[in-house]
């Protein structure tokens, strides 16, 4: 009798936790900054929940229990995964500044809709667009892991201190201390947070793509704000202003020896382009990088260039053109 009942119980439990998969994926991404790692961490979380289903006593909600598992798995992954940025293949022009290396991948908008269905709790401090934007995501990646997790749990998702403390194997007082230190850092960098989207956002992305595909560097520069930045996570090189960015773009164009093809997409709630470089000996173009644009009413305020093309399938971008 029990042999027939057990599979039904297991199936019922799996069906119960499956609706949380998307929001847990975004949660893990916010903490670790990697799409592939978020995939693995969600699988680990759901498997750990299934294996430990008999220990779930119902004192916390099922959602809180799953978030506790996902948070701890993510923090463990950060402790055991000391990434190093790839070295640039060529000597780059002198940057405006060198930042601390930051491991970060873009997040496809196609995954955001399902992930954001759960409303934020009463303690949330940020609007949804801010928390998925690339600028905010970059900023929290610069926090120490436990501060980062505390901000995501309390200020982004809106869990109360009493709910977040067990998820971090801590106390409400200790979590409050983590939040206070993290908020000081976030407020200091708040000027870098992207402005709300302007009506020109789609137009700017289209003009940028056209200039990129025609090799019109001056056209790209004409779309930028005076204080625009170009960054390339995880590399530390950062360029600000038309002169520095123009020097970088012209140098890269000279190395490529060909204009890029651009396919529009969306990442972190922002316009993005999958860029392809034509092959010299074949009538195809291979993935070259993914560009995410941050816009303001005055123009494009940031270009974030991701060289890791392994993220293309997440965005539905083809492996070749």
Image (tube, helix red, strand yellow):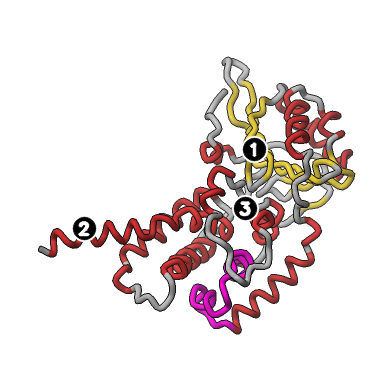
Among numbered discs 1 and 3, the one appearing first in the sequence: 3
The verdict on residue 97 being magenta is no
Q: Which residue is label 1 attached to?
A: 290
**Which corner quadrant holds the C terminus?**
top right
Q: Which residue is label 3 attached to?
A: 103
Q: Residues within 10 Å of mark 3 (few under 14, many from 20)?
A: some
Instruction: Name the main secondary structure of what is drawn in magenta.
Output: helix
Secondary element under disc 3, as helix, strand or loop, is loop
Q: Residues within 10 Å of mark 2 (few under 14, many from 20)?
A: few
- Residue furthest toward the left? 1
Q: Residue at x 32, y 68 (%)?
A: 53
Among numbered discs 2 and 1, the one appearing first in the sequence: 2
The verdict on residue 166 being magenta is yes
Q: Residue at x 78, y 44 (%)?
A: 198
Q: Which residue is label 2 attached to?
A: 7
Question: Could you tell me if the residues under marks 2 and 3 are in contact, i.e. CB atoms within 8 Å?
Answer: no
Mark-to-mark CA distance, 2 and 1: 44 Å
């Amino acid at each position: 009798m029990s042999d027939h009942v057990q599979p039904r119980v297991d199936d019922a439990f799996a069906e119960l936790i499956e609706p949380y998969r998307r929001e847990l994926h975004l949660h893990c991404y916010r903490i670790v900054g990697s799409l592939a790692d978020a995939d693995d961490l969600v699988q680990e979380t759901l498997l750990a929940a299934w294996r430990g289903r008999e220990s779930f006593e119902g004192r916390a909600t099922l959602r809180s229990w799953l978030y506790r598992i996902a948070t701890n798995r993510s923090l463990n992954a950060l402790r055991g995964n000391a990434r190093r940025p790839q070295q640039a293949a060529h000597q780059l022009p002198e940057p405006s500044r060198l930042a601390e290396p930051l491991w970060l991948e873009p997040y496809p908008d196609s995954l955001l809709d399902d992930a954001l269905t759960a409303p934020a709790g009463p303690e949330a401090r940020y609007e949804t667009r801010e928390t998925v934007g690339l600028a905010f995501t970059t900023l929290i990646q610069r926090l120490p892991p436990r501060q980062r997790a505390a901000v995501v749990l309390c200020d982004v998702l809106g869990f109360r201190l009493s709910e977040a403390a067990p998820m971090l194997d801590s106390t409400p007082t200790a979590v409050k201390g983590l939040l206070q230190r993290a908020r000081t850092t976030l407020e200091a960098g708040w000027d870098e947070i992207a402005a709300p989207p302007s009506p020109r956002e789609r137009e700017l992305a289209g003009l940028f793509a056209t200039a990129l595909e025609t090799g019109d560097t001056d056209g790209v520069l004409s779309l930028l704000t005076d204080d625009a930045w170009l960054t390339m996570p995880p590399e530390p090189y950062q360029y600000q202003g038309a002169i520095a960015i123009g020097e970088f773009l012209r140098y890269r164009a000279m190395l490529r020896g060909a204009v890029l093809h651009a396919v529009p997409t969306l990442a972190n709630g922002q316009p993005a382009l999958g860029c392809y470089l034509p092959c010299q000996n074949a009538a195809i173009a291979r993935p070259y990088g993914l560009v995410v644009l941050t816009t303001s009413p005055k123009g494009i305020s940031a270009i974030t260039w991701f060289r890791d093309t392994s993220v293309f399938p997440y965005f539905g971008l083809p492996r070749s053109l």
